Image: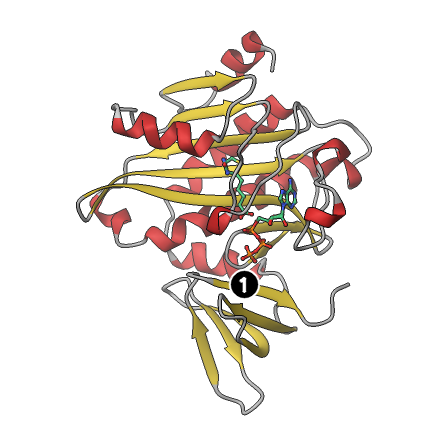
Amino acid sequence: MELTALATALASTTVKDYRYFPSIGSTNDEALRWVDSGAPDFSLVVADEQTAGRGRFDRRWVTNPGAALAFSLILHPAPSELASLALFAPLCGLALRETLHRQYGLQPQIKWPNDVLLAGKKTAGILVEAAWLGDKATGIVLGIGINITRAALPPPSARLFPATCLEEHLAAPVDRITLLAHLLNRLAAWRSRLGTPRFFDEWQKHLAFKGQSVRIEDSQKTSIIGIVKGVNPRGDLVLTLANGLEQDFAAGDVHLRPLDPQ
Ligand code: ATP
Ligand code: BTN
């Protein structure tokens, strides 16, 4: 990244401090270390390449040099936010969806619990982690990886879900630094609306696979099929089962797959 352009763009945001790396293992790991050594609220770690990028359950997140936007934002949760830790992944989804819509006219959808899709394919992943002191979260790290160019895409054999990138949906190239600055501003805006009726309304409105049949699978590979009804105030996914009853699923160790992939 061009460092003067990065500094200028970040000056238009509320980022307090930042660290930039041409290459790093994982921006989330660096952010968690920085929390322990006193990073202020709204500090940023951004990298051009990750050699050990992580998804949920330590799955690998591919971040090829210069082809993606990969960053981690550190928040110091206020007491009121601590009760809503499960809502920080959707917060990132809402902020990214809105940025991609406003800046590029795209129509992204939010796949519960942590992905942003374009035309049903994954274009961004979100990994929210907390740093703990005893049972108190001392910091939250919002890790976001966005595929910008085709070079960002992992080989098909390494994909558990269809993948895409912004440039597959746009005629003009995307400037990563401009995207980052806009997204940081939307993250700050949605943080102030965490858990509000507007937050849930927007989430439901842009929830992927709503009204469609999906399979929810746990780590024991037990699966349940149902129709996506929406999300509840805890952030759980609500499915309507074949017998007409509703069942809620917490984000923990469960995965959502459409029954009829497009
Ligand atoms: P879940 O539905 O549980 O979130 P997932 O398939 O989305 O499952 P994650 O753990 O969220 O899996 O994300 C990691 C997975 O994303 C990897 O196992 C790989 O299949 C895929 N992946 C890795 N890098 C990229 C990338 N740059 N773009 C798209 N997909 C990727
Ligand atoms: C997922 O789809 O499971 C989440 C992927 C999250 C990737 C981002 S890239 C920036 C940050 N650093 C990481 O190691 N992971 C997150």
Do we see residue 73 in this rendering?
yes
Pick the residue in front: 41 or 49.
Answer: 49
| Residue depicted at x 68% and y 47% | 158
Q: The C terminus is located in which quarter? A: bottom right
- Quadrant holding the N terminus: top right
Closer to the camera, 181 or 136? 136
Tell whether 108 sits left or right of 237.
right
**Circle 1 crowding by C-alpha within 10 Å: few under 14, some 14–19, many from 20:** some
In this picture, residue 108 sits left or right of residue 231 = right
Instruction: Answer above or below: position of 258 versus 36.
Output: below
Residue for point 60% across, 72% down: 215
Residue located 47% across and 51% down the image = 57
Residue, disc 1: 255
Q: Is mark 1 within 8 Å of ligand 1?
A: yes
Q: Position of residue 204 (x, y in %)?
A: 53, 62
Q: Position of residue 126 (x, y in %)?
A: 51, 44
SS for dot 1:
strand
Q: Residue furthest bottom?
A: 243
Instruction: Pinpoint residue 235: horizontal percent, then vertical percent.
Output: 41, 62
Residue 75, percent across and down? 33, 35
* Residue 3, image quadrant: top right
Quarter-of-image position of residue 236: bottom left
- Residue most toward the left? 134
Q: Is residue 46 above or below residue 94?
A: above
As drawn, which residue projects farthest toward the top?
Answer: 4
- In the image, what residue occupies the spot 48% across and 31% down? 26
Residue 221 vertical position relative to residue 57 in the rendered view, above or below: below
Kind of residue at disc 1: His
Looking at the image, residue 109 lies above or below residue 79: below
| Residue 245 in the figure: left or right of residue 64 | left
